[in-house]
Amino acid sequence: MKEKIYFGFSNSVHDPAIAIINQEGSLLFAEGLERRLKNKRAWNASTDSIGVIEPLLKEYGKNKQIIAATTWSQSSMRLVPILTKLLKLQQRYYKVFSDNKEQLGRIYENQLFQQSMYRVPNHLNNLLLNLEFRLLEMGNPSPIKISYNHHLCHAATACYSSDFKEALCLVFDGLGESGSLAAYHYKNNAIQLLKKSGKLNMASIGLFYQSVCKACLFDPLSGEEWKVMGLASYGKLSQEYYNLLRPMLYVKGGILYRSKDYYHRLSQLLQLSFDFTNAMDAKDLAFTAQFITEELTKEILTQLHAEFEINQLVLTGGCALNSSSNGEILNKTSFKKLFIPMAPGDDGNAIGAAALAWQNDHKNKKLSITGAPYLGSVIKEQDVKRFIQFSGIRTHTCNSQFELTDKVADALVEGKIIGWIQGRAEFGPRSLGNRSIIADCRNKSIKQRLNERVKFREEFRPFAPSILHEKGEEYFNNYSYTPYMEKTLLFKNLTDTPGVVHEDNTGRLQSVTAENNPLFYKLLFSYYQKTNIPIILNTSFNVMGRPIIHDMEDAFGVFMGSGLDMLVVGNTIFNKKDKE
């Protein structure tokens, strides 16, 4: 009997990803397709795209029986053709027989749902056809396909990644197979559903936030909800906006519901965009919407804690990417501990699907996939050598990690902006020290330099502080270990690190330990020895609208086409000032 290997496929129409778990239960690989495809969020891309699946099969799947697990159940896929026809009929009615201005909310949401079902297969047999064909070419047996509930995949990723023995797991996102919310009890490696939204319950913090994103002149399909969070720090609470938005959603029994006049209010919300000439005009709307999001999240969690009396919380789903809200949870609820996984969005479901398939075959064993998030691809040494040979830029190759971190720390102190690439790429939406742009946090003007000359993005976008974990309590209120930039916390000291202090005196931090990322820790420690500051500025290695860099071509393109001063790949340093 062939050895089994478990491929998990996140097959949502956005943020597709692949994760691989071996027969022993080790998580070998996890990566979003957007990076290899060079397509932000990879909307409507096949989750086993040609050019993506082949190298993974060659490295991990040869002569093995592949269990291919997907992240939407078969029953939900069967409904797609029916729902698509129904949505088209509704859209025709809204546009022809109704006042378009009054029905703006229904029209927008209807089209959003249609986009979400664009090119979705209606049966598991119609998925993973590229995988099947490549396995046939390799002489491997056909994959054994299995599908899992979308929210259960979210829960599996989060629960199996935590080190909790027991927890309440809340999944909340845009929409799953039954509404936007599901609560689970995680204990003794088992995940049991406690309650969920009803199938016809469309209440959703995720959809609410998407609509606010649209009203603020951003694009939710491009994942620009991040911009709403950044913009909110510049605004203030507007009673007018609060009175309009707050009644749209309410919480009862830990479940979210819509008001009867939801679409009327949604139409008014979307019409606000006509009053804005640029995003900064919407700063009070962004603040108010973020305030309401935090209120609703607190109400849901407070009611769930009162009902189930479990003190440890696992939070996941797309709404768990709201780091500002996450940073307030332990202060404003009765939960004592909080865990949020490296990839709480739909890309992370690839891990959950693979984990559920593995656990199904190993019922008497405990699966644990805790650890560092560095699970993606590596930039190969021969690619670096090729760029050394043909780029026309002189390079320096360091002979030790001490020399490398010392030189790069010196460059940071000098004010250089550096592209930093090491080892395997991070899984999830954030750069955590392996595909990062780094800079000196002591310089207030570094924000403007980065936004204008490197990232080419709006001036209100913040940058993250990466901090030596043991120094966290000295710099942040209510500090706790935050390895994935999953929480935003208030700074205690605003003078030492102005480059990473946001407008509201907060930072979306990353705790760095020698265990999780030894080299990045050494770099931070070297910088600390030179400056007495245990924090460096860390942002994703990309430009606005593009995925985080995937290969040497991406890295060099950003390096030469932006205001980066230095590029570090492994132990090789490229410096523009040395160009011939």
Image (cartoon, helix red, strand yellow):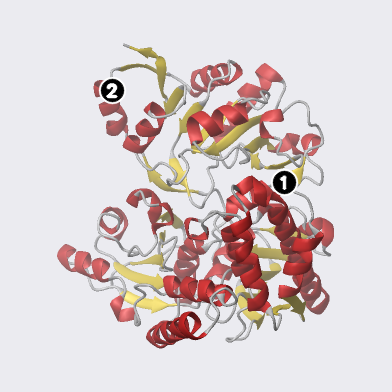
Quick one: 188 or 47, which is closer to the camera? 47
Quadrant occupied by the C terminus: top left
Marks 1 and 2 in Cβ contact (< 8 Å): no
- Residue 185 visible? The answer is no
**Seen in the image, is 456 located left or right of residue 385?**
right
Direction from residue 388 to residue 273 in the image, left or right = right
Q: How many numbered discs? A: 2
Q: Assign a secondary structure to mark 2.
A: loop
Which comes sooner in the sequence, label 1 or label 2?
1
| Nearer the observer, 468 or 42 | 42
User: Quick check: 269 left or right of 491?
Assistant: left
Measured in 3D between alpha carbons, the distance from the residue under mark 1 to the one under mark 2, in whole angstroms, is 42 Å
Q: Mark on residue 391?
A: 2
Q: Which mark is residue 233?
A: 1
Amino acid on which the number 2 mark rests in the picture = Ser
Q: Amino acid at mark 1?
A: Ser
Query: Camera-side residue: 65 or 144?
Result: 144
Q: Is residue 423 above or below residue 125?
A: above
| 193 in relation to 12, above or below | below
Q: Quadrant of residue 548?
A: top left
Dividing the image into 4 quarters, which one contains the N terminus?
bottom left
Quadrant hosting residue 114: bottom left
Considering the numbered disc 1 on the image, is that residue within a helix, a strand or a loop? loop
Is 263 above or below relative to 9?
below
* Image location of residue 346, percent across then percent down: 50, 64
Residue 467, image x and y in percent? Answer: 67, 35
